[in-house]
Image: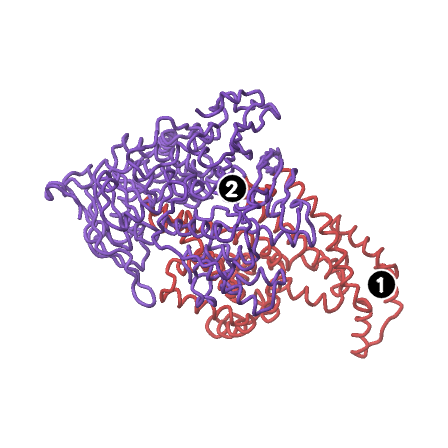
Amino acid sequence: MLRYIVWRIAVMIPTLLIISALIFTIIELPPGDYFDSYIAELRAQGESVDSERIQMLRKEYGFDKPPVLRYFHWVGGMLHGDFGYSFEYELPVRDVVGDRLWLTILVSFVTIVFTWLIAFPIGMYSATHQYSWGDYGLTLLGLIGLAIPNFMLALILMYFANIWFGTSIGHLMDQKYLGQPMDWDKAKSILEHLWIPVVIIGTGGTASMIRRLRANLLDELHKQYVITARAKGLGPFRTLVKYPLRMSLNFFISDIGSILPAIISGAEITAIVLSLETTGPMLIKALQSQDMYLAGSFLMFLAFLTVIGVLISDLALALLDPRIRLQGGSTK
Amino acid sequence: MLECGAVGMVSSTDLLRIEDLGISFAIIGGPIRAVRHASLRVLPGKVTALVGESGSGKSVISQAVMGILPHTAHITGRILFSDPETPGETVDILKMPRDGPQIRALRGSRIGKIFQEPMTSLSPLHTIGNQIGEAMQIHTDASAAERKARTEEMLGLVGFANPARSYDMYPFELSGGMRQRAMIAMALICRPALLIADEPTTALDVTIQAQILKLLRDLQAKFNMAILLITHDLGVVANIADEVVVIYHGEIMEAGPVEAIFRRPAHPYLKGLMAAVPHFDLKPGERLAAIREVPVNVESLLSKRKVSSSRDREILLSAKNLEKTFTTRKSDWLGKEHKTTVRAVDGVSFDIRRGECLGLVGESGCGKTTVSKILMRAVTADGGSVVLNSATGPIDVLAAEGAALRELRTRIQMVFQDPVSSLSPRMTVQDILSEPLEIHGRGDARSRLAKVKALMQAIGLDQRFIHRYPHSFSGGQRQRIGIARALALGPDLLICDEPVSALDVSVQAQILNLLKDLQKELGLTYLFISHNLAVVDYMADRIAVMCRGRIVELAPREILLRKPVHPYTRSLVAAVPFPDLDRPMDFKTLKLTGAADMRAWGPQFRDDGEADALAPLDLGGGHLVLARRTADITELRPC
């Protein structure tokens, strides 16, 4: 197993290299660079363009060099934590992302916990009471949650949050704390605002998770080993938790691979509608304005999280399922 | 119907008494009445066998006793349980609330149950120690250490050589027989008064079946418990039961002591069932009496194939020194790798003559299916050669490519074990039967349709069913469709891999007779693979016995089963239970280590680790035995 982990980590290096080359190429593909779009924007606003300063900046960031050199410069920088410079914000990428990253992780983490807390009991109820009124009702509710677009739900909830609770519209905190250092009042304000994005982003995820848990559990519920457990005299709830639920967890664990990147980049549209201080809207803006180092580093980070997430879910599967742990590697 | 002497006296001593039980399932289109007015009893400390085909309602009754029927079941009648531990107290199981504490206190504690499929009835994610000890955890206040000690004691009782180590093993690390033992340990750990065994040996090999039956009998005597044995195998019944109850279509046909039932079967259904089971005493040419016979009509197929008797002795397929090795790799958390190599097929040679049926028997895992897959080119052999002498000239089976391989595919066809999963559920009978013809570009749409109809007629399937899908057929009908599909291209050789082991006894006889008739009418050649010696004996002209990838004995059927020479063949034959009270199985001579354990064989049959020490020796009359080259043939020869 140790050898397997080392091997998997070794394979990650070429994988990430290939991804970085792809990201760089795609960002380079559109004609021009950040400065071209910057000049165009200034001209459109009727402002004068200091072409000398632009040329200087171009030189400073190596835009006069061939792309291959710039690629290696970028990759080399990332290895020692230098993610490049954001032209838009005129700050190093690290400083731009920093604060937002923590807020994003907070929102996503709470959302995931919210999803699990709601989805698991409902999924278990639906599966054990298949075709009952409760099952139908919860299924309908789930379908509604799945069908309503997030941005619409966001608009509706914003309206009612303002009317009923007097919570100000938009943002993850009260306007006056924006850009302020973290303190108790700011933290309280964040918690006050947090539930709206969590409910909005969580609804769709909860509904689909209920569906999947129900389907997986239904497959397991009629297996012979469940009857064996009942024939032993085990109570219905303990039987459910110990045997079929445990068996149907595999899908859930293999999901970790996709949950990790989603923590950082998920729910962009909701974030834009609610003008949340998360990383999603920032990524979209960076891609639009060809702020290449910000966008590139961001995408690299997502790729890294995906690769790590898949590794973690594979190891967790091996840990939880003895069949995978002990039977692997057999060949025909 | 029960032969009770003084009704009042006996009823108080019955451990389990089922009175006028009716079970129906509510489904769309009206209820299905699975059990009707069934009454039976189980005496304490006795084995009562409930015999019937699948769908007869026998398993449903056992589920009703445990209270584990599905929600849709509607039950009437009474199931009275008198626990000998609380004398004088009789409870009606049907009156207890579903899954309530009362019934749960009985389950696993006073009534234990073992199931047919040891592969699926244990959770793959929990160790067997955990699953066995759980029954004790539910019903007693024993501490964790006590539970572990008791579980290990039980594991030892059911035949685990090293209980402490087995405690932490997962079910998939055990063979089918060992899993069934673990299952028995789980059912018996709380010392129940009644054990319900639902087809406990059906999924096991004959030698393992004999061991499990012996174990059940020993434990039954040791704990003085009653067993309700549910089975369709009359051989098992004759060897283990004290009382027999025969059920057919949800109704009890006949009940009584085993002596009365076997010596004087009264009901025609039971008589029919007894005549449908193949056994070793069939005279050559004697036919099984299938309960529902299928007429064979091959006239429309015959025009294409004429069998000339002069070619009867010609060798159709010759396999020489087939080799196949499988490698499994296992590694632990620290990266140590254990490679295990299994020689699935090890120097297998045999000839199949045109028009004969060669039987291939052996326990599961002996390599018989791998051999068939090599012949079908589904598995690539590591070494050896196979030559097929088809009408158009010899084909090198293992090397054929391109057009030769396509030609080969039409010459060898296969009938599979599972008639459910081997037919596509999305194709009609017509699609299934004409697909081989389309693949090989035979004829046009009209001639293909005619051929499909002829095939259906040949297997006795009504032509009106041509547009039906496989799910609307019974297991036996599906297997007939599988046979027709294999016949569509007019092959020389038909490989039948356990074609009847998934079928009921009565249907089994019907399929075997169909295969026999087709062989006679069409001059087919069969390679018939089975683990059931009696079935092979009924079908085959010559029989090859495989053990650990090698053919240990090959002889004409009259010789092999009556005068076997090799110790492995002998223990296989000895393990077959006869549906005959006068020929009980000899449980004493059963080897606990299994028939394939070489150490128990005579020195002339062992290679003792030497390579190339064993060779097939000819005892005359086509009787080959794998033994040491230096062994004396006259000593080996059966007397």
Across and down, in percent, residue A11 comes to: 70, 46
On screen, residue A98 above or below B621: below
Instruction: Give whichever of A77, A209 is nearer the camera.
Output: A209
Question: Which residue is rendered at x = 19% and y = 37% of the image?
Answer: B84
Across and down, in percent, residue A42 comes to: 80, 74
Q: Which residue is mark 1?
A: A57
Given this view, does label 1 or label 2 mark the residue nearer the observer? 2
Q: How is the image coloured?
A: by chain
Chain letter of disc 1 in the image:
A
Does residue A198 appear in this view?
no
Instruction: Give whichever of B393, A305 is nearer the camera.
Output: B393
Question: Which residue is rendered at x = 60% and y = 53% of the image?
Answer: A257
On screen, residue B140 above or below B306: above
Q: Which residue is mark 2?
A: B358
Colour assignment, chain A:
red
Query: In which quadrant is the C terminus of chain B drawn?
Result: top left
